Amino acid sequence: MNVVQKTIAVTGAGNGIGRALTLHLLNKGARVACIDKDEEGLQKTEMEAGSLAVRLSCHAVDITNRETLPGLVNQILHQHGCIDGLINNAGVIQPFTTVKNIEMKDIERVMNINFYGTVNMIKAFLPHLLPRNEAHIVNVCSMGGFVPVPGQVFYGASKAAVKLMTEGLHSELKNTGIGVSVAFPGAVATEITLHSGVPPPDIPISKKKNYTAISPQKAAEAIVKGIEDNAYHIFIGSDSKWMNMLYRFNPELAANMIQRKMRDLLKL
Ligand SMILES: NC(=O)c1ccc[n+]([C@@H]2O[C@H](COP(=O)([O-])OP(=O)(O)OC[C@H]3O[C@@H](n4cnc5c(N)ncnc54)[C@H](O)[C@@H]3O)[C@@H](O)[C@H]2O)c1
């Protein structure tokens, strides 16, 4: 789908990849409905949009609050006239800890935001996308949604659920005008740990030097290109692309590589 003059709803638009998506879409000539529970973050996104903010609306909404979503849809329709696209990007990580030690409330929280939040948005928006001649949905998953990351097991499980739900939705919508993509970012330089409210991992300084993460701008460009190309899967960053190939070739080898990176941190 060409994004020019289209209205696209972006969740998690108050920070990181969501803000970069908003700015990139505005620069390409789209209208954007920014959704986030972080009101200050939304204000910052609006400020960074400068004169392009005339094509933007901001909505302080928690995507886990299902009852508020019909009102959100109405607000967007009122302000923009239609909705052509939905990017489910809002998400959180879990505390960096093992299956044995994580608390049930932290498991429920990550599933509730990453999986059910995405489901809530799709259930609320799909009836308004279906009548469009052309529309697009992108669900932002993670490299951790196809390869296991110790210490982020339930984050990965929530993203794996998003992956399969998205692929199933793609199959169900095959004979409609709605394109469906799932995006798999590798490491992206955002403050997701801070915004997720979890303590930062205690990574030894020597390991930090090797850590390369792409910019949120590059991630946003890849996602929008995925919409334009109607891509089934969007792998973002060389780590995600490479790990996808390795995982297909030998899943256990791929899992062992990640395990080696995480074992000191988790004392495994
Ligand atoms: N940063 C990475 O390395 C990375 C890697 C793979 C996947 N991802 C995924 O990319 C997406 C964006 O992450 P990011 O790195 O930009 O993080 P971020 O923390 O910078 O942005 C996430 C945004 O989601 C919002 N949010 C969280 N819960 C919400 C809720 N219940 N309702 C509404 N908004 C909510 C936050 O307020 C925040 O503004 C996430 O789904 C994340 O899992 C990120």
Image (spheres, rainbow, N blue to C red):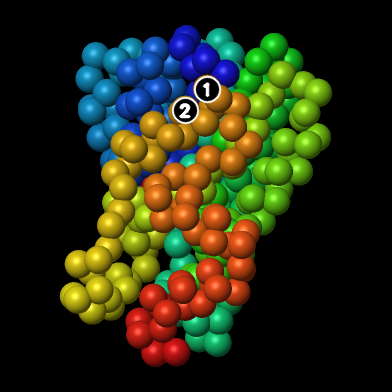
- Name the residue that disc number 2 marks: 225
Residue 161 placement: quadrant: bottom right
Amino acid residing under circle 1: Glu
Residue 95 locus on image (x, y percent): 43, 72
In the image: residue 146, left or right of residue 209: right
User: With 224 as the anchor, is 43 left or right in this view?
Assistant: left
Report x, y in % for residue 256.
Answer: 51, 77
Q: 93 above or below 120? A: below
> Can you identify the residue that label 1 sits on?
228
Q: Do the residues under discs 1 and 2 have CB atoms within 8 angstroms?
A: yes
Tell me which amino acid carries mark 2: Lys
Percent from the top left, x then y, of residue 155? 53, 64
- Comparing 24 with 73, the one in front is 24
Is 185 placed above or below 146 here? above
* Camera-nearest residue between 10 and 180: 180
Which element carries disc 2, helix, strand or loop?
helix
Element type at mark 1: helix
Choose between 114 and 175: the one closer to the eye.
175
Asked which quadrant contains residue 265, the reply is bottom left
Query: At 53% from the left edge and 69% from the top edge, which residue is drawn?
Result: 254
Q: Residue at x 39, y 12 (%)?
A: 29
- Residue 101 in view, yes or no: yes
- Return the x and y of residue 75 as percentages of the image width and height: 53, 22
Q: How many marks?
A: 2
In this picture, residue 250 sits left or right of residue 126: left
Residue at 73% in and 15% down: 131
